[in-house]
Image (spheres, rainbow, N blue to C red):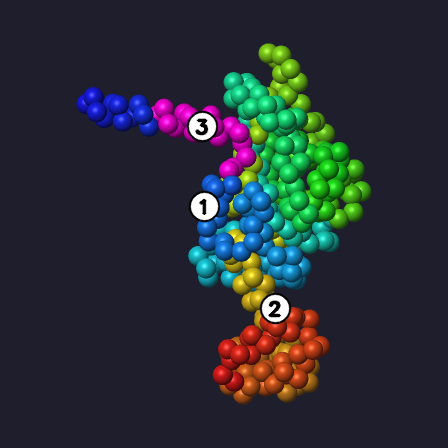
Amino acid sequence: MPVLKFIIVLILGFSFSLTAVEGQHVQISRDELITLTSHWHGERFPDGRPKVSDNILDRMKYVSVEEAWAVLVNAGFKYQIAEDWKVIHPDSVLVGRAVTTTFMPGRPDIWSVVDSIGKKEGRKAQNVWAVEMLKKRDVYVVDQFGAKRNGPTIGDNVGTAIFSNSGNGIVYDGALRDIEGLEEIKGFTAFYTSYDPSYHNPGSGANRDLTTMIMGINRPTKIRNVTVIPGDVVLGKMGVVVFIPPQLAEKVVVTSEIIRLRDMFGHQRLRERIYTAGQIDTRWSEQIEKDFSKWLNDHINELPVPKETIQDFLKERTW
């Protein structure tokens, strides 16, 4: 290898090593997070995480999985849905802003480095590092790599802390414990992979069981086949979780609301036998579109969609 090339490789390798060590602070830096989420131009938390408005979160719970999926796919986001979850409180809808955490299989040398840095920062057990950072309406999104035996980092105590800080639930790709206790937390909607009565306990000494170790807080993480970014809007219902990029959250909501209005109008006209199913269940004629616009104007103060949304929609119509 030429000397110059060897020096460059050596320098790059050394730089990578420094970055890796610095990265063991685990939590992403504010500047790095802002760069990573540069498509978002709205409000942010002090740490740089996108803060989609409470108003959009309130309206998001009425969005169907299909409606969200359609908007995301049309925007080029084809892998934003994770399926086949076990659910605590399946009749509720989980909506909030993602706080991401990544765990990896434990190995003593890396675990000790990460843990020692955490202690210098005043942190305690690794399984609660991100839990202590949660804000209201956050959703704790965890890649626990499906760990089962000796893998659970959440039981009813940590679950209570999560709900106390966020008022919300979790998406957890791993095993939970204390399911009965977690079910008693009203409002704690949890999407999780499996159950196991064991618990995450690194212990001490050479024979400690290092099943898992924390490797990232508010960094990109993988949940099933989805890349999740901190600040993504989480929509969980019917055993399915959709991760919506913050810059698309409002579009998802507004699109859903317009579809809802069209369905209300269409169903009403079918009940009234003004139009046939063939006319409603296809591309609408200009006559039906004009009727729809008039119906919106006539009922604008009665419809379950913000008046401003309807007015903005009508401004763009030519019917």
| Contact check, label 2 and label 3, Cβ < 8 Å | no
Q: How far apart are marks 1 and 2 (CA)?
A: 31 Å
Please check the rendered image and state whether residue 28 is part of the magenta-colored stretch, yes or no: yes
The image quadrant of residue 126 is: top right
| Residue at mark 3 | 20
| Residue at mark 2 | 257
Q: In this view, does 15 lie above or below 167?
A: above
Q: What residue type is labelled 3?
A: Ala
Q: Mark 1 vs mark 2: which is more N-terminal?
A: 1
Q: Which amino acid does label 1 sit on?
A: Thr
Q: What residue type is labelled 2?
A: Glu
| Residue at mark 1 | 35
Residue at figure coordinates x 71%, y 42% from the top left: 165
| Mark 1 surroundings: few (<14), some (14-19) or many (≥20) residues within 10 A | few
Q: Give the range drawn in magenta.
A: 13-29
Q: How far apart are marks 2 and 3 (CA)?
A: 45 Å
